[in-house]
Amino acid sequence: MKKIGILGSGVVGQTLANGFIKHGYDVMIGTRDKEKLSEWQEKNKGLVGTFEEAASFGDLIVLAVKGTAAMNVLGMVGKENLENKTVVDATNPIADAQPENGVLKFFTSLDESLMEQLQKSFPSANFVKAFNSIGNVFMVNPDFNGMKPTMFICGNNKI
């Protein structure tokens, strides 16, 4: 059975963890604050650990933290826990600044995406961008009146 390490304990991390558990995967959510997930852990058969423990646990890793925290969280995990693993990146590079005239601000430029920055910093991991263009209610088994939507993914690994 494949093991999934989820880095992030917010709504997206919990939604994806629940979806993987529903489909028979062993899951560990990594978080800074294990107490935050005590209620989740009582209701689910998933595990809770630190970011490093979740990354070490997972055969596949899901990065589900705020974009501004992504580099820091992966740094806490350690390069050795990412080596030759696929990291599904669900982050968006939304800045901590307030939107201006209703438009979100980003902390990356058009010349280099957050995923490119992460791949450059952690070259032994295989990054795949997914889940970042939809809301969490559509991340697991989306169904639009009997139709399954096209879901976007992107990565640079040829395997």
Image (cartoon, rainbow, N blue to C red):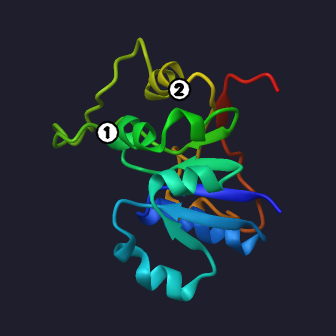
Viewer-side residue, 118 vs 143: 118
What is the CA distance from the residue labelled 2 to the residue labelled 1? 16 Å
Which mark is first along the chain, 1 or 2?
1
Q: Secondary structure at mark 1?
A: helix
Q: Quadrant of residue 9?
A: bottom left
Q: Judge whether 137 appears above or below 110 on screen.
A: below
Q: Residue 72, percent across and down?
A: 35, 38
Q: Position of residue 60 (x, y in %)?
A: 68, 48
The residue beneath circle 2 is 122
Quadrant location, the C terminus:
top right
Measured along the vertical axis of the image, is residue 33 above or below residue 134? below
Residue at disc 2, secondary structure: loop
Q: Foreground: 107 or 122? A: 122
- Name the residue located 59 percent from the left edge and 82 percent from the top edge: 44
Q: Which amino acid does the dot numbered 2 rest on? A: Phe
Q: Is residue 81 above or below residue 123?
A: below
Which marked residue is nearer to the observer: mark 2 or mark 1? 2
- The residue drawn where x is 35% and y is 76% is 35
Q: Which residue is mark 1?
A: 68
Q: For the residue carrying disc 1, how many other residues have a C-alpha within 10 Å: few (<14), some (14-19), or many (20+)?
A: some
Residue 144 visible = no
Q: Position of residue 130 (x, y in %)?
A: 60, 42
Position of residue 39 relative to residue 74, above or below, is below
Q: Residue furthest bottom?
A: 42
- Judged left or right of residue 129, residue 66 is left
Residue at the spot 53% in from the left edge and 51% down from the top edge: 134
Residue 157: image x %, image y %?
73, 24
Q: Amino acid at mark 1?
A: Thr
